[in-house]
Amino acid sequence: QVQLVQSGAEVKKPGASVKVSCKASGYTFTGYYMHWVRQAPGQGLEWMGWINPNSGGTNYAQKFQGRVTMTRDTSISTAYMELSRLRSDDTAVYYCARDLWPGRGDYGMDVWGQGTTVTVSS
Amino acid sequence: QSALTQPASVSGSPGQSITISCTGTSSDVGSYNLVSWYQQHPGKAPKLMIYEVSKRPSGVSNRFSGSKSGNTASLTISGLQAEDEADYYCCSYAGSSTYVVFGGGTKLTVL
């Protein structure tokens, strides 16, 4: 079945970087854009950006530009999201989510990973 | 502050219908039929309920329906059931600059 499995929880100090992985299975990884969405404790969903696994092209939300890097390894059907210069308000659950429509990044997110908790604390 | 505005909470009794609004602008909801809705139970990942304003993914109950008028999209849940109690988020494409925006979320309580 189609699924996304994310890496485990992380605890980081302010100023550090974190890299979260998202392994896809059950479908053609390069056929669907991958979004990254985060959710701070008790807060709503926040879109961070997407990566086109076929070309490696990315589109980042303005808020995260300069701090976020999305990459992929097509040989192992895995997408990555790295966030640098972490602050306490980056503490959140980070989700990867597949776009609904092949080759598009704007139709919605039909398959979600289980989420990865990132805690930033000194 | 979220880009799309949703009521913080709504409630209804079992069997009733409720509607959750999602107000954007002419740069997002008003310009594109690319509104989606997500249901999120506590501690769980979001689940896609509606896409392209009014389409339901396979497996989603037909008690869930979506619509749009101008800059406001709506999610209607009919025949409320206890299992519908969750947070609901709207989402819209917002053009090639901003790209994707979410609403702040609405907590649905089934009384």
Image (cartoon, coloured by chain):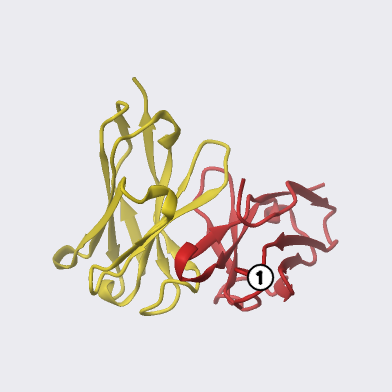
Chain colours: A yellow, B red
Identify the residue shown where x is 79% and y is 50%.
B10
Give the amino acid at mark 1: Ser
Task: For mark 1, give the secondary structure.
Answer: loop
Vertical side of A28 occupied by A84: above or below: above
Question: Which residue is identified by label 1?
Answer: B26
Residue A62 versus residue A18: which sits nearer the camera? Answer: A62
How far from the left and from the top, in percent, is residue A96?
38, 56
State the residue at coordinates (27%, 68%). A57
Picture quadrant of residue A83: top left
Is B28 on the left-hand or right-hand side of A15?
A: right
Query: Depth check: B32 or B48 in front?
Result: B32
What residue is rendered at 34% in x and 60% in y?
A: A4
The image position of residue B106, as x and y in percent, is: 69, 51
Q: Name the quadrant containing residue B78.
A: bottom right
Question: Crowdedness of circle 1 by 10 Å Cα count: few (<14), some, many (20+)?
Answer: few
Using the rendered image of the protein, determine whether residue A114 is visible from the camera's viewpoint: no
Taking the view exactly as shown, the residue that stands out farthest to the left is A75
| Image label count | 1
**Spot occupied by residue A40 in the image (x, y as percentages of width and height):** 50, 39
Quarter holding the N terminus of chain B? top right
Q: Chain of mark 1?
A: B
- The image quarter containing residue B28 is bottom right
Residue B38, position in %: x, y? 58, 60
Residue sitting at the far top: A122
Camera sees residue B1: yes
Residue at image position (35%, 70%) is: A33
